[in-house]
Amino acid sequence: MEISDIRIRKILQEGRLRAVISLTIDNAVAVHDIKLVQGDDRMFVAMPSRRDEAGLFRDIIHPINPEARGMLEKSILEAYDKYINAEAGGAETAQV
């Protein structure tokens, strides 16, 4: 699995939600509405989800093993850091 594109769609300054991200896997599958959340100890990636009939949130898509999750989180966090550092330097692009 190769992440071929990561786009920072929205940056937020208030609350725990820091960014909304889209990514493309193997130039074939797009995943939208991935959230980057500031936790108590670190930032983490929350996969797209929806509320079921019982009122519980269920992931729509998610990695099925720790290696895949780690690779996704690492790539997303690196893209976010790159975007934030470029934004601080005056760059105007949302694509990383």
Image (tube, rainbow, N blue to C red):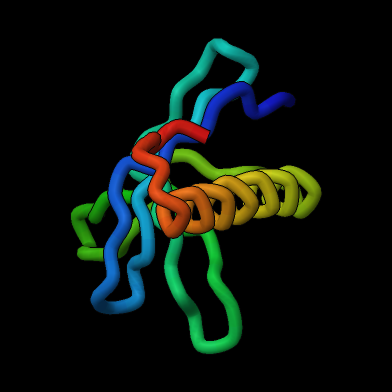
Query: How far from the left and from the top, in percent, is residue 70?
Result: 73, 53
* Residue at the right extreme, as displayed: 67
Q: In this view, does 57 lie above or below 94?
A: below
Position of the N terminus by quadrant: top right
Q: In which quarter of the image is residue 94?
A: top left
* Residue at the front extreme, as displayed: 90
Query: How far from the left and from the top, in percent, is residue 89?
Result: 46, 53
Q: Is residue 16 above or below residue 71?
A: below
Q: Residue drawn at (66%, 45%), measured in percent from left and top?
A: 75
Query: How far from the left and from the top, in percent, is residue 87?
Result: 41, 52
Most foreground residue, 74 or 49:
74
**Count the marks: how many?**
0
* Residue at the top extreme, as displayed: 28
Q: Residue drawn at (28%, 71%), measured in percent from left and top?
A: 13
Q: Residue drawn at (22%, 62%), measured in percent from left and top?
A: 54
Q: Residue drawn at (35%, 39%), measured in percent from left and top?
A: 92
Query: How far from the left and from the top, in percent, is residue 9?
Result: 32, 41
Most foreground residue, 41 or 96:
96
3 on left or right of 49: right
Most foreground residue, 62 or 34:
34
64 on left or right of 85: right
